[in-house]
Image: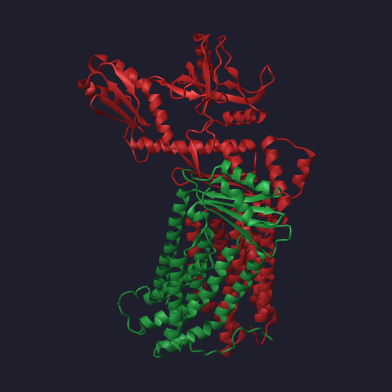
Chain colours: A red, B green
C-alpha cells in the first residue's frame, strides 16, 4: 500500500542532495566570495600571485560556487534611477543634417532662391528659402536626402519628415526614426554607463533598462549616490571646435551658425564658437591622466586614424588661429594653433586637480553619453546599516526556526520531527534554488524566508490533521497515512497556487526590495510543496517500512 | 503528551453569532475607512516623493536642535523623528529626517544633502548618515499607480481562480474576506500612522496570499462535505467543515505567527513596519476566513443538487476536479 518505487526515491533524494549542495557555498559566504573574485581576476588578467592562489584555494573548485547575491539594503551601496533625455539626440541629428540640406538647396538655387537657417525649437530644422514658389521643389530635394529605415514596425518609412509652411521649410525626424533613435540612445547609454562603472572596478553592479527611457544603476560598495552620479551623470561630450571670438557678455548675439559658450574655469569669460565639430571625443582611442610641461595635471589623448587626419588637416590650415576644446557645452581651454599637429595625439590642459584629470580621462576613455540624464530616484545605504540588518535578520531567522521546530515536535511528536527534517531541508533547498537562479536577497527577502519558515509547515499540518482524522475513523495506520496524503492534496495545491499567484504578481509589478521578497516567497512555496508532498512522505514511508508499527499516533 | 491548540473533536457553532460577527466586521471596515479618510496615511517617500535621511550618532538625538539646524536651509516641510529599538545600545541614537520633494528637481541634489550634513555636523560631530534615499515626484506617482494595479490584479486573479476551482459564491466570499483584511490593515496603518511605502504594499499582498490560503483550505473541505452530506442543511455542513479544519487553521496561524513575532522583536527597526503589517494581517486573515468568507457564502447559498447535471450559470467550472 505504502509503496514508493525505488527510482522515485532516488530522484527525490538526488534533488534534495543537489539543492543542499547548491546551498552549501552560502554557509561559507566570505570564503566563497574570495574564491570567486580571485578566479575572476585571474581569468581576466592572467595574473597569478600567492595571495590570489590562497584566496582561490579557500574553496574547492569542484564544489558549486554560486552565491545568493546580497541586495543593496544588506550590503550597502548606491542606487540610481536615471531618465535618458532621448530628445537631446534629435537636436544633434538636425545639427548634423543642416550642411547636407544647405548643399542640396544651393544646387537648386535657381528655383528656391537663397537659403537661410532660422532658429527653431530643438529637434526641428527651419530653413527660409528665398522663393516661396519653389517650395515644392525644395521639399522634393530635401526629401531625397532621407534614408529608408529598417525596423520591425516601420518598413518603408524614411528617417525624416519634410514640410513647408509659407517660405519656411521644416525638417523633423519621423516618428519611426524617433523610435529607432530612442532605442539606440538607450542602448548606447547602457553600454557607456557599464564601461564607466567597470573602469572603477566595483563588484557586481546592476545596470539595466527600465521601461522605455530609464536606466537603473545599482553599485554595491560605493560610498554614496552623489559619487556614482559624478561618474555617470556627466555626459563627457568632448569636441574640438573653431573659435570665432572671445567676449565677456554671455548674452551676446553669436550670429547664425555660432554659439556662445562659457569658459569652464574663468568666471565671466565666454567664447563665441562655430557650431561645427572638427573632431569629437568619439574619435579618441585613448586618454590618460598626465602632467603638462609645467607640472600641472592634464589629460593626454590620442585620436584614431580618421580623427588624426581631420585634426592634422585642420591644424595645418589654421595655424595662428585659436580653437576650443569643449566639454559638455563648456570651454576647457582655447589654445592657439602653433603648428601643424600631424600625429593625432595631444594634451588637454586646464585648471585641473589630479582627481579631475583622472576622472576626465576615465570619462573620455569610456566615451560620451549620447544624451543627458536626469535622476528620478537615488538611494545610498551605508555598509553598517546593511550589516546590522543582516545580523538582525539572521538572529530572527534562527529564533523563528527554532520556535517552529519545537512547536511542531510538541504538537505532532515523531511526525513533527519528520516535518522538521523536511523543514530544514526546505530552507536548504530554498537557498540552493536562490543561488542557482542568482537571485538577490534583500531585507524584505529575509522577511520572506521567515514567513516561509512559518508557512512551510502548513502542507505538513494539512496532511497530519488529515491522518489524525482518518485514524479516528478507525483505519489502519498505513491506510490512514495514504488517505491523509491523498485527501489533503487538493487543499495543498489550491492554497499554494493562490499564494504563488500573489508572489508572481509581486515579482512582475515590484522593484528592488519588493521583488526580493517576491522571489523568496515564490521559491519558498515551490520548495515547501516539494518537501511536504515528496520528502516528508518518503521519510514517513521509509520509517513505516522499518518499524511496521501496529498503531501510530500523530 | 501532545500540545493541542484545540480539543480533538470540536463542534463549535460558528454561525450562532453570525449577526454579531458580521456586525463587528462591518463596523471595523467602516471605522478603518473613516480612519483612512480622516487621518490619512503616512506615505513614505516611495509614494509622496522626497528624501529620508537616517542618521546615527553616539550622542543623544535632540529633535528640536536638529530642526533648528535644518530650518534655515529653507527646504520646506521637514519632519524629524527619533527611532527607538530595543537592539540599539546607549551609544546608538538614530533619527529619521524627512524632507519634502523639492521644487523643480526630481531627486534631491547632492548639494542639499551636503548642506544638511554640514548643518547637523556642527551640532553633533559624531553624526553619520547611515542611509539617504530620495525619490522624485515623477517616480512616486508611477509607484502609486503600479501598487494599486498590483493589488487589484491580485484580487481579480484570485477571484478568477476560486471561481474556476469552486463556485462563484465562494469567489465572492473569498474576495470579500480579502477586502475586509486589506481595509482593516490600511485602517491600522492610518490609526497608528505607520509609514506606508512600497514594502507595505508587499505586506498587503502577502496578507492577501495568506488569507486566501486559509479560506481556500476551509472551502476545499466544504466542497468535499457538500458532496458527502447532500441533504444536511448548508449551515450545518459549513459548521462541520470549519470545525474539521479548525486544528489546521490555528496550527498554521500559530507557526506563522511564531516566526513573525521572532522577526518583529529581533528583526531590527528597518523592517518593523513591514513585519507588523503582515503579523496584523495574519490575525485578521485567520478571523476573516473563519467568519467573513463563510457568512457571505451562507448568505448567497450554494447549489446543492449535484445529482442532476445542471447547465446553470457560473457552475460549469465548479467541479473541474470532481
Q: Which residue is drawn at 69% across and 71% down?
A: A402
Q: Quadrant of the C terminus of chain B?
A: bottom left
Please state the horizontal and vertical placement of residue A73, each as a whole percent of the image.
Answer: 61, 53
Q: Residue at x 24, y 14 (%)?
A: A110
Q: Quadrant of the N terminus of chain B?
A: bottom right
Q: Is residue B309 visible?
A: yes
Quadrant assignment, res A541: bottom right
Above or below: residue A390 compared with residue A251:
below
Q: Check the image and name the residue furthest to the left.
A: A133
Task: Judge by depth and name the residue closer to the eye, A278 or B187.
Answer: B187
Please state the horizontal and vertical placement of residue A274, each as a whole percent of the image.
Answer: 44, 19
Above or below: residue B172 compared with residue B71:
below
Q: Can residue A194 be seen in this view?
A: no
| Residue B301 placement, left or right of B31 | left
Q: How many marks?
A: 0
Quadrant assignment, res A465: bottom right
Task: Judge by depth and name the residue closer to the eye, A432 or B83.
Answer: B83
Please state the horizontal and vertical placement of residue A302, each as a whole percent of the image.
Answer: 59, 21
Quadrant assignment, res A160: top left
Task: Judge by depth and name the residue closer to the eye, A102 or A179.
Answer: A102
Please state the horizontal and vertical placement of residue B185, each as a whole percent of the image.
Answer: 50, 69
| Residue A359 placement, left or right of A90 | right
Above or below: residue B284 compared with residue A21:
below
| Residue A314 placement, left or right of A409 | left
Amino acid at each position: 500500500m505504502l509503496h514508493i518505487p525505488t527510482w522515485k526515491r532516488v530522484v527525490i533524494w538526488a534533488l534534495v542532495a543537489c539543492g543542499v549542495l547548491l546551498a552549501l557555498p552560502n554557509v561559507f559566504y566570505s570564503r566563497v566570495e574570495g574564491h570567486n573574485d580571485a578566479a575572476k581576476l585571474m581569468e581576466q588578467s592572467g595574473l597569478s600571485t600567492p595571495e590570489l592562489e590562497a584566496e582561490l584555494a579557500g574553496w574547492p573548485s569542484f564544489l558549486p560556487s554560486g552565491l545568493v547575491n546580497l541586495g543593496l539594503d544588506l550590503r550597502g551601496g548606491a542606487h540610481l534611477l536615471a531618465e535618458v533625455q532621448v530628445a537631446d539626440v534629435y537636436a544633434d541629428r538636425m545639427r548634423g543634417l543642416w550642411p547636407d540640406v544647405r548643399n542640396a538647396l544651393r544646387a537648386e538655387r535657381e528655383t528656391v532662391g537663397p537659403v537661410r537657417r532660422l532658429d527653431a525649437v530643438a529637434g526641428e530644422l527651419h530653413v527660409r528659402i528665398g522663393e516661396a514658389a519653389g517650395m515644392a521643389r525644395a521639399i522634393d530635394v530635401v526629401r531625397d536626402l532621407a534614408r529608408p529605415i529598417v525596423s520591425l514596425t516601420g518598413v518603408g518609412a524614411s528617417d525624416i519628415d519634410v514640410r513647408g509652411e509659407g517660405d519656411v521649410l521644416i525638417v523633423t525626424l519621423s516618428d519611426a526614426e524617433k523610435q529607432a533613435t530612442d532605442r539606440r540612445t538607450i542602448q548606447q547609454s547602457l553600454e557607456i554607463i557599464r564601461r564607466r562603472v567597470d573602469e572603477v572596478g566595483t563588484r557586481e553592479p546592476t545596470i539595466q533598462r527600465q521601461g522605455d527611457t530609464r536606466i537603473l544603476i545599482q553599485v554595491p560598495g560605493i560610498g554614496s549616490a552623489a559619487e556614482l552620479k559624478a561618474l555617470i551623470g556627466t555626459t563627457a561630450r568632448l569636441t574640438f571646435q573653431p573659435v570665432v571670438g572671445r567676449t565677456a557678455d554671455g548674452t551676446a548675439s553669436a550670429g547664425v551658425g555660432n554659439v556662445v559658450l562659457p569658459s569652464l574655469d574663468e568666471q565671466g569669460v565666454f567664447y563665441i564658437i562655430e557650431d561645427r565639430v572638427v573632431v569629437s571625443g568619439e574619435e579618441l582611442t585613448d586618454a590618460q591622466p598626465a602632467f603638462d610641461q609645467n607640472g600641472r595635471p592634464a589629460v593626454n589623448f590620442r585620436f584614431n586614424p580618421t580623427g588624426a587626419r581631420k585634426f592634422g588637416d585642420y591644424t595645418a590650415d589654421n595655424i595662428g588661429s585659436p580653437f576650443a576644446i569643449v566639454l559638455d557645452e563648456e570651454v576647457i581651454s582655447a589654445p592657439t594653433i602653433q603648428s601643424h599637429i600631424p600625429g593625432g595625439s595631444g594634451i588637454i590642459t586646464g585648471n585641473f586637480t589630479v582627481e579631475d584629470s583622472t576622472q576626465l580621462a576615465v570619462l573620455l576613455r569610456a566615451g560620451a553619453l549620447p544624451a543627458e540624464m536626469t535622476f528620478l530616484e537615488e538611494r545610498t545605504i551605508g555598509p553598517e546599516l546593511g550589516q546590522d540588518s543582516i545580523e538582525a535578520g539572521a538572529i530572527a531567522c534562527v529564533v523563528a526556526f527554532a520556535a517552529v521546530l519545537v512547536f511542531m515536535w510538541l504538537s505532532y511528536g515523531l511526525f513533527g520531527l519528520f516535518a522538521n527534517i523536511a523543514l530544514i531541508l526546505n530552507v536548504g533547498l530554498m537557498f540552493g534554488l536562490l543561488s542557482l537562479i542568482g537571485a538577490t536577497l534583500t531585507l524584505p527577502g529575509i522577511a520572506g524566508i521567515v514567513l516561509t519558515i512559518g508557512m512551510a509547515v502548513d502542507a505538513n499540518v494539512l496532511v497530519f490533521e488529515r491522518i489524525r482524522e482518518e485514524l479516528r475513523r478507525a483505519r489502519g495506520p498505513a491506510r490512514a497515512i495514504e488517505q491523509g496524503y491523498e485527501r489533503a492534496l487538493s487543499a495543498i495545491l489550491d492554497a499554494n497556487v493562490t499564494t504563488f499567484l500573489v508572489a508572481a504578481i509581486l515579482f512582475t509589478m515590484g522593484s528592488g526590495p519588493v521583488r526580493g521578497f517576491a522571489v523568496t516567497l515564490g521559491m519558498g512555496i515551490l520548495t515547501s510543496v516539494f518537501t511536504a508532498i515528496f520528502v516528508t512522505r518518503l521519510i514517513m514511508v521509509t520509517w513505516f517500512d522499518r518499524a511496521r508499527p501496529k498503531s501510530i499516533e500523530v | 503528551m501532545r500540545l493541542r491548540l484545540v480539543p480533538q473533536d470540536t463542534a463549535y457553532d460558528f454561525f450562532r453569532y453570525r449577526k454579531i460577527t458580521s456586525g463587528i466586521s462591518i463596523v471595523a471596515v467602516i471605522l478603518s475607512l473613516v480612519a483612512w479618510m480622516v487621518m490619512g496615511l503616512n506615505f513614505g517617500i516611495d509614494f509622496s516623493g522626497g528624501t529620508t535621511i537616517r542618521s546615527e550618532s553616539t550622542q543623544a538625538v535632540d529633535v528640536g536642535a536638529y530642526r533648528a539646524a535644518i530650518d534655515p536651509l529653507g527646504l520646506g516641510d521637514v519632519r524629524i523623528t527619533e527611532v527607538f529599538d530595543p537592539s540599539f545600545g546607549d551609544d546608538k541614537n538614530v533619527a529619521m529626517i524627512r524632507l519634502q520633494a523639492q521644487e523643480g528637481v526630481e531627486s534631491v541634489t547632492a548639494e542639499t544633502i551636503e548642506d544638511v550634513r554640514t548643518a547637523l555636523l556642527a551640532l553633533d560631530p559624531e553624526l553619520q548618515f547611515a542611509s539617504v534615499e530620495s525619490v522624485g515626484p515623477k517616480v512616486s506617482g508611477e509607484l502609486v499607480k503600479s501598487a494599486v494595479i498590483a493589488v487589484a490584479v491580485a484580487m481579480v486573479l484570485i477571484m478568477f481562480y476560486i471561481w474556476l476551482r469552486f463556485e462563484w459564491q465562494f469567489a465572492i466570499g473569498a474576495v470579500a474576506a480579502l477586502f475586509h483584511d486589506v481595509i482593516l490593515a490600511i485602517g491600522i496603518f492610518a490609526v497608528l500612522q505607520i509609514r506606508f511605502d512600497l514594502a507595505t504594499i508587499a505586506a498587503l499582498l502577502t496578507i492577501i496570499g495568506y488569507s486566501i490560503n486559509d479560506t481556500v483550505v476551509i472551502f476545499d473541505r466544504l466542497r468535499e462535505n457538500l458532496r458527502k452530506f447532500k441533504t444536511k442543511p448548508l449551515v450545518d455542513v459549513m459548521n462541520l467543515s470549519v470545525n474539521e479544519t479548525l486544528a489546521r487553521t490555528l496550527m498554521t496561524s500559530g507557526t506563522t505567527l511564531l516566526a513573525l513575532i521572532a522577526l518583529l522583536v529581533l528583526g531590527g527597526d528597518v523592517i518593523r513596519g513591514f513585519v507588523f503589517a503582515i503579523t496584523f494581517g495574519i490575525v485578521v486573515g485567520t478571523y476573516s476566513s473563519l467568519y467573513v468568507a463563510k457568512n457571505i457564502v451562507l448568505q448567497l447559498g450554494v447549489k446543492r443538487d449535484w445529482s442532476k447535471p445542471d447547465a446553470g450559470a457560473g457552475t460549469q467550472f465548479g467541479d473541474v476536479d470532481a
